[in-house]
């Protein structure tokens, strides 16, 4: 089926990466508090960002947006920002939790005269990092003496991954320039793993205890199968 800009004004058939790259330099969002109410503007479109469209995907906070922590208001804002920027419901739904945890929770607006800015480039950088976690294919792995019997270490060229043997849960260990990012995620039938929880700690620290905490959390969420 052919589509065009007349039938679907914002759904022109083109490569997604090219569309996002074209948007990078000209998109900017700004957030502020007006009489205590969080307000987010799309400066490029000269309009206020509304939660209405994102509420059709997820309903974390019908009352509106917030930022600076990992709650329901920031989750709604994360979904709305990704949806507005990419115009792609799949991308927004798959990545908004991680975008909330990594980006929206870090936005700061301390007073009535203060505001935060988020550019298209900022969003591009975050999305590029999320892409690295797609399609974790189980490969058996090898047992680890520091983990329960239902977990194993999986060989990856670019990062360390621990795989749960009885269900599609993974702990992904990524080393940044200043800190570790350790993510518990679930693959299920998704093209992208869904983040369930995460830990961060200085890169000079041993991440083993954080990995063990997330492994234990997974086993608490879904009890391991008992061998008979």
Image (cartoon, rainbow, N blue to C red):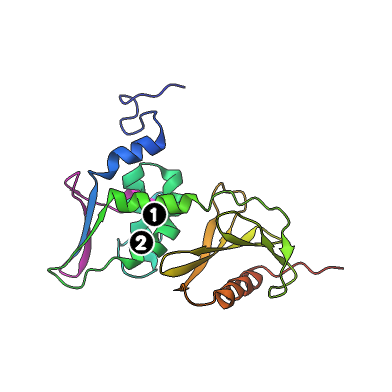
| Residue 96 pos. (x, y %) | 42, 55
Q: Check if mark 1's residue and mark 2's residue have beta carbons within 8 Å.
A: yes
Kindly identify which residue carries mark 2: 103
- The residue located at (32%, 34%) in the rendering is 10
Q: Which secondary structure, mark 2?
A: loop
| Residue 28 pos. (x, y %) | 23, 50
- The residue located at (21%, 66%) in the rendering is 37
Kindly identify which residue carries mark 1: 126
In the image, residue 100 sits, relative to residue 121, either above or below, namely: below
Q: Is residue 78 magenta?
A: no
Q: Which residues are magenta?
A: 33-55
Pick whichever, 64 or 162, lies toward us: 162
Q: How many marks?
A: 2
The answer to whether 59 appears left or right of 156 in the picture is left
In the image, residue 213 sits, relative to residue 151, either above or below, namely: below
In the image, residue 25 sits, relative to residue 8, either above or below, namely: below
Structural crowding at the residue carrying mark 1, measured as other residues with C-alpha within 10 Å and reported as few (<14), some (14–19) or many (≥20): some
Q: Which secondary structure, mark 1?
A: helix
Q: Is residue 44 magenta?
A: yes
| Residue 153 pos. (x, y %) | 67, 63
Looking at the rendered image, the quarter that the C terminus falls into is bottom right
| Residue 113 pos. (x, y %) | 12, 68
Would residue 133 be visible to someone looking at this image?
Answer: yes
Mark closer to the chain start, 1 or 2: 2
Residue 142 lies in quadrant: bottom right
The answer to whether 67 appears left or right of 212 in the picture is left
- The residue located at (73%, 69%) in the rendering is 224
Structural crowding at the residue carrying mark 2, measured as other residues with C-alpha within 10 Å and reported as few (<14), some (14–19) or many (≥20): many
């Amino acid at each position: 089926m052919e589509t065009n800009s007349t039938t679907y004004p914002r759904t022109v058939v083109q490569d997604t990466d090219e569309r996002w790259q074209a948007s990078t330099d000209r998109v900017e969002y700004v957030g502020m508090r007006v009489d205590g109410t969080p307000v987010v503007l799309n400066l490029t479109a000269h309009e206020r960002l509304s939660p209405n469209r994102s509420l059709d995907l997820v309903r974390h906070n019908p009352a509106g947006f917030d930022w600076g922590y990992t709650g329901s208001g920031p989750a709604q804002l994360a979904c709305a920002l990704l949806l507005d920027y990419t115009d792609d419901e799949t991308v927004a739904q798959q990545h908004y939790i991680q975008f909330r945890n990594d980006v929206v929770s870090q936005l700061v607006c301390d007073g009535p005269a203060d505001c935060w800015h988020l550019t298209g480039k900022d969003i591009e950088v975050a999305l590029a990092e999320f892409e690295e976690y797609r399609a974790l294919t189980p490969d058996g792995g090898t047992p680890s003496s520091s983990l329960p019997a239902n977990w194993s270490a999986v060989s990856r060229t670019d990062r360390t991954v621990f795989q749960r043997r009885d269900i599609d849960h993974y702990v992904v260990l990524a080393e940044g320039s200043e800190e570790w990012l350790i993510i518990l995620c679930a693959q299920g039938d998704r093209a992208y793993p869904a983040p369930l929880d995460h830990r961060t700690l200085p890169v000079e620290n041993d991440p083993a205890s954080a990995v063990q905490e997330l492994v234990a959390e997974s086993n608490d969420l879904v009890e391991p199968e008992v061998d008979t």
